[in-house]
Amino acid sequence: MAKVEPKLEEQCEALYEQMTIRSNASPEGKAKTFTQTELLDLGIVKKEEDLMGLLQGLADKQLVRFMSIGPQTVFALRARDVAQKICRLTQDERMVYTFVENQGLNGAWTKHMKQKTGLVQAVINKVIKTLEGRVLIKSVKNIKAPAQKSYILAHLDPGDDVTGGPWHSDGELDSEMIGISANVVIKFVESRSWDHKTVKVERHRSMSPIDMLGEPAHIKKEPGSPTRINGTAHHSGDHKRKRDDTADIEDLARRRKKYDKVEVQVAYPPGYAQYPTAAEIFDMLKNSGFIKNQLRMEDIQSFLDMLVMDERIERIGQGFRTIRGIRGGTKMMQSGLQDGLMSTDDQELDENGLTQTPCGRCPVFDLCEEGGPVNARNCEYFDTWLKA
C-alpha cells in the first residue's frame, strides 16, 4: 500500500494538470466540463474504474466536482485556491456555494436559494456576505430581473442571458454605445470602400446687372455719354467705344465664375480585395478599447447584419462596403449619442422621399447632366432601386 498511494497521488496530479490545460485552451475556459470519454482520451489511465478512483480523490480535495447534465455525468475543475477556501466552509455556506456553482453562467437568485437549500432568509443573507468577503461569489445585475440580485462564482463572467451581451451596461441597453460603435464601424469601412477624389464644381448663383457690371448703385457710367454724380452731368473724355455693352457683361460674368471643391466617392475597379472583413472589424473594435464588455466574433457578426439591414453597409465578396453617400449610423442609432459627443458633420441628415432615391444621396449630383460622364442614362443604381 505504501507504494500504491504515491502512484495514485501522481496520477491525480497528472489528471488535474491535463484538465487544466484543456480548460484554458477551450472557448469555455474555466467553465468547461469533461465527460469520461474525454478524460480517458488524456491517457492517464485506460479503465473507467481507475479514472473514477482518480476523480474521487480530486473531489475529496474539492479540486473536481461531479455534475449531472441529463442522463450523463460530467466533471468540472476548481482552482486550487478556491478548493482550499471551500474546505474551510461550514455546511450552510457549502450548500449555498454549491447551489450558485451549479447555476453556472446564468446566475442564482436569492429566492431560488431559499427554496433549494431550505435555509431562512436571514441565514442566506449572512452566508452570502461571508462568501462575497472570501471572494467566492459575486453579485451581477440580471436584465430579466434588474431589481433582484443574482450571484455567480467570483472567477466567472456572466452569460449573455444575464448581461444582455456587449451592447448592455448595468443590465440596460446602452444606446450610446450602439451609436458610437455604429459610427466607428461605418467610418472604418468607408475609409476602405471608396477612392476619394476632389473635383471642382461651378458655383451657381444669381447676379443682378449691377453686380455683373461691378459699379456702385449711385454711379452709372457709359462710354460716350455723360455720367451723373450727385445730380451733376460730367462728360467722359473718351468718346470711343472699344466693345459693346453685351461683350462687357459676358466678360465680367466669366471673370466672376467661382468653383467649389467637392470630395466624391469613386468605386474601386473589379477585383479590389481590400474591403474590410468581419474579422478585421472585430480586431479593430477589440483593440480600440472603448467597449468594456467582453466582445465575441458572433456579436460583431450580428451587429454587421444589423447595419446591412439598415442599409448602412453592404456585403461585397468576403468583405463589407458602405452604401455610397453613407457617413454615419441611422437616426435611431444617433439618438443615443450625447450632445457634443459627435460633430455635426457626422450626424445623418433627416431622410425624406428625395433622399431615398439614388439622386437624393448621390455624391456627384452636381456633375450629373445630360451628355456628361455622369448622367441619368448610365446610372448604375436606378435599375436596382426601381426593382427593389
Image: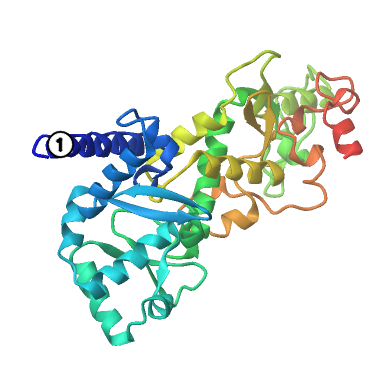
Residue 364: image location, x then y, percent: 73, 30
Q: Is 72 left, or right, of 150 in this rendering?
A: right
Residue at 19% in and 48% down? 80
Left or right of 338 on screen, residue 123: left
Location of residue 200 in the rendering, given as x and y in whole percent from the top left corner: 66, 24
Disc 1 marks which residue? 4
Quarter that holds the N terminus? top left
The amino acid pointed to by label 1 is: Val
Image x and y of residue 14, in percent: 23, 33
**143 lies left or right of 55:** right
Look at 69% across and 24% down and name the residue there: 255
Along the viewing direction, whichever of 28 and 224 lies nearer the viewer: 28
Q: Residues within 10 Å of mark 1 (few under 14, many from 20)?
A: few
Q: Quadrant of residue 237?
A: top right
Q: Nearer the viewer, residue 94 or 300?
A: 94
Left or right: 37 as drawn, with respect to 50: right
Quarter of the image with the C terminus is top right
Write down the quadrant of residue 62 in the picture: bottom left
Residue that protrudes farthest toward the front in the picture: 1
The answer to whether residue 234 shows anywhere in this view is no
Q: Is residue 320 visible?
A: yes
Instruction: Identify which residue is drawn at 79% across, 32% down.
Output: 225
The furthest residue to the left:
2
Closer to us: 111 or 295? 111
* Nearer to the camera, 314 or 381: 314
Secondary-structure class at tag 1: helix
Does residue 224 lie above or below 173 as drawn? above
